């Protein structure tokens, strides 16, 4: 009896130690040293460039507000968090921070007081950033005019708002560590990998997420729905390697927001507007060089609305062809090829043929403009059709464009359109 | 006189003309903004005059401020905000200049209202209420309510629903403008009944032949307005 109890106690104790060790794992080897890098104009300029590469401004600025003063609401499935003030204001920003404090946040995901940060701040990516780049970023942020903008408390629900929950999350999904170069690949490819996996934090949207909001490395860049934004992020890998011409078009798309065949919309237009258009040509080439080697990954998206039977599908396609002729073909062409740099092609367009029709539906309902960029400052716009077409007509025209000109995507039910 | 010296006045003129020329709409702008026509009508003349008003012929500076207000969230609209979210200031300025240059072709969007209501509305529009420091609409928007270049819009030929919705939105903080937001101040002084009366009276006004905003020197404004300095 006594021995049995002892054994049980021993197992329990081992379990506690094991869990404690597991929770402690991401924290092991935490080492933050002070650096003394004089904030030269060159360093500040480099930091500004890196801030753009990281698109820091997008989350750390309220629309129309002071740049980098934070306060923007970031919705998550666990509650809302508000971005922090990155200007050097002593009371509410980074005024009293050191470059070491900043590095701790970037590399270890911890605030100056050691508090673990919510991973809405993408430190699972930013940990890949080098100390030198972190110091340059910090020098740039310190050079901004200080703006008073007090932190707003997150509304994350219990138990997700506890430090213990964050320890568990970090044990599951976070390993601090800089990027290691792949010696088999070119310097250009490695530079692309550094930007995509690190500052660019592309997998924040284009990577699959687990039910606890962790990025799922095994699923890679399979994309998925961004329920808080109402958009889907497409997968980034391709079934076959991109041809050089396709890679060049992808670079145009990321740089100008509009390519010969395609435009960026929704959250990606924001990334192009604030970040990618400002990157050096060589860095965009590097990013594309890396992206084109990503293996194919397919999203597990829920079915978009009810299944459409063959007969109903045919009827929708017939009505859709009429709607298309009346409302769409003037711009996108009877052949679905659009007009280069003006109206995107719908044939073989990934937004059109995605398994889920969500992004295509949004585009038809609300319209939109491609972003203004240095290379394409006066983009064309697509009108909203929400008030012009009935749900059945919209389902019909979507069904038509998703199956015309060699496109082969499932039909869209009118019920799925009415739900929006 | 050398050729260069003879050219000087011309060159100088060109240099002076440049900033103005930058605001001129270029010839290929129309197809770029065709998306706007779905709600605001061809060349900005709205067919329905409901909540998507005509924008043709409104002052360029006013239109530009509204485009920025929508983009930056000071005005809220489910379609307008995402539509403009990633357009640069220069482009918005060009779009505003294009619509400002269009012929407004206004017509009255009238709706019946009781005599008492119209009388209340008329008194506020023409005289305001000095006891609570409420300026008359006409003080800024002009005796004929056609507005003033470059930043004060005309109020005629808009549906009373649209006008009332704007005043209501200002009153509740849903519509905002650059601070100091004079119209928010005005709207906060109006009761819902007064908003109904003012908009009924304005909507009942005939639209004169010449219906462009006045290009005279703008009046001394009774309130400070960030959008019309």
Image (cartoon, rainbow, N blue to C red):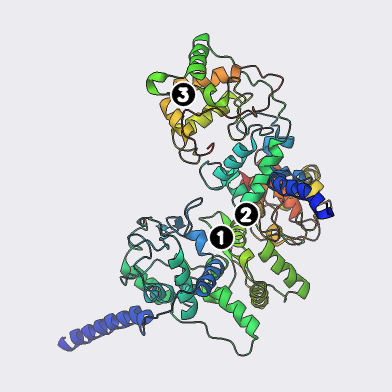
- Circle 3 sits in a helix, a strand or a loop, which is it? loop
Residues packed near mark 3 inside 10 Å, few (<14), some (14 to 19) or many (20 plus)? many
Instruction: Please name the residue that numbered disc 3 is placed on.
Output: B135
**Residue A187 x, y percent position in the rendering:** 63, 85
Q: CA distance from mark 2 to mark 3?
A: 49 Å
Tell if the residue under mark 1 belongs to the same chain as the one under mark 2: yes
Residue A258 falls in which quadrant of the image? bottom right
Q: Is A129 placed above or below B8 here?
A: below
Q: CA distance from mark 1 to mark 2?
A: 9 Å
Q: Residue at x 76, y 75 (%)?
A: A244
Instruction: Please name the residue that numbered disc 1 is placed on.
Output: A225
**Residue A154 x, y percent position in the rendering:** 37, 57
- Chain containing mark 1: A
Q: CA distance from mark 3 to mark 1?
A: 51 Å
- Circle 2 sits in a helix, a strand or a loop, which is it? helix
Residue extending furthest toward the left:
A2
Q: Nearer the viewer, residue B6 or B102?
A: B6
Dots 1, 2 in contact, CB < 8 A = yes
């Amino acid at each position: 009896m006594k021995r049995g109890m002892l054994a049980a106690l021993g197992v329990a104790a081992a379990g506690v130690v094991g869990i404690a060790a597991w929770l402690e794992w991401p924290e092991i080897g935490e080492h933050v040293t002070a650096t003394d890098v004089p904030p030269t104009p060159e360093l500040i300029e480099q930091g500004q460039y890196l801030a753009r590469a990281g698109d820091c401004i997008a989350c750390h600025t309220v629309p129309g507000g002071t740049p980098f003063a934070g306060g923007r609401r970031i919705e998550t499935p666990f509650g809302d968090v508000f971005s922090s003030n990155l200007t050097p204001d002593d009371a509410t920003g980074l005024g009293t921070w050191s470059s070491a404090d900043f590095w701790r946040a970037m590399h270890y995901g911890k605030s100056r007081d050691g508090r673990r940060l919510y991973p809405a701040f993408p430190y699972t990516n930013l940990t890949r950033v080098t100390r030198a780049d972190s110091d340059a970023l910090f020098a740039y942020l310190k050079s901004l005019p200080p703006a008073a903008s007090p932190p707003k408390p997150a509304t994350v629900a219990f138990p997700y708002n506890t430090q213990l929950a964050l320890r568990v999350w970090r044990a599951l999904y976070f390993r601090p560590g800089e990027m290691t170069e792949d010696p088999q690949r070119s310097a250009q490819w490695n530079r692309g990998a550094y930007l995509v996996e690190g500052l660019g934090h592309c997998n924040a949207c284009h990577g699959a997420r687990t039910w606890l909001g962790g990025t799922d490395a095994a699923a890679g860049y399979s994309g998925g729905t961004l329920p808080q934004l109402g958009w889907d992020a497409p997968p980034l890998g391709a079934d076959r390697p991109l041809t050089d011409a396709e890679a060049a078009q992808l670079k145009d798309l990321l740089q100008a927001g509009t390519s010969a065949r395609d435009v960026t919309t929704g959250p990606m237009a924001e990334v192009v507007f604030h970040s990618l258009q400002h990157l050096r040509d060589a860095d965009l080439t590097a990013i594309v060089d890396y992206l084109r080697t990503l293996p194919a990954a397919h999203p597990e998206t829920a079915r978009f609305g009810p299944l459409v039977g063959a007969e109903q599908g045919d009827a929708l396609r017939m009505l859709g062809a009429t709607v298309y002729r009346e409302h769409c073909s003037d711009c996108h062409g009877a052949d679905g090829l659009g007009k280069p740099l003006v109206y995107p092609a719908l044939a073989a367009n990934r937004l059109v043929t995605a398994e889920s029709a969500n992004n295509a539906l949004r585009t038809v309902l609300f319209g939109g403009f491609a972003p203004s960029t240095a290379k394409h400052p006066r983009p064309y716009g697509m009108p909203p059709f929400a008030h012009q077409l009935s749900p059945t007509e919209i389902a019909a025209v979507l069904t038509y464009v998703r199956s015309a000109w060699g496109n082969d995507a499932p039909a869209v039910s009118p019920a799925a359109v009415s739900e929006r | 006189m050398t050729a260069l010296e003879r050219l000087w006045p011309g060159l100088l003129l060109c240099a002076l003309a440049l900033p103005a020329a930058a605001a001129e709409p270029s010839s290929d702008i129309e197809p770029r903004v065709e998306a706007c026509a779905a709600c605001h009508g061809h060349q900005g003349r709205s067919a329905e005059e409901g909540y998507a008003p005509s924008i043709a012929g409104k002052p360029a500076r006013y239109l530009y401020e509204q485009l920025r207000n929508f983009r930056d969230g000071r005005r809220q609209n489910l379609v307008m905000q995402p539509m403009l979210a990633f357009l640069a200031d220069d482009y918005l300025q060009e779009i505003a200049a294009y619509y400002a240059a269009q012929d407004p072709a206004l017509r009255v969007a009238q709706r019946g209202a009781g005599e008492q209501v119209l009388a209340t509305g008329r008194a506020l529009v023409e005289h305001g209420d000095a006891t609570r420091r409420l300026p008359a609409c006409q003080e800024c928007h002009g005796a004929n309510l056609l507005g003033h270049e470059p930043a004060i819009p005309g109020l005629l030929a808009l549906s009373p629903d649209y006008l009332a919705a704007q005043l209501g939105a200002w009153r509740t903080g849903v519509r905002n403008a650059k601070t100091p937001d004079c119209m928010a101040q005005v709207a906060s002084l109006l009761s819902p009944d007064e908003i109904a009366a003012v908009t009924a009276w304005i909507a009942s006004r005939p639209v004169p032949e010449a219906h462009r905003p006045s290009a005279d020197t703008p009046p001394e404004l009774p309130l400070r307005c960030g959008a019309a300095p």
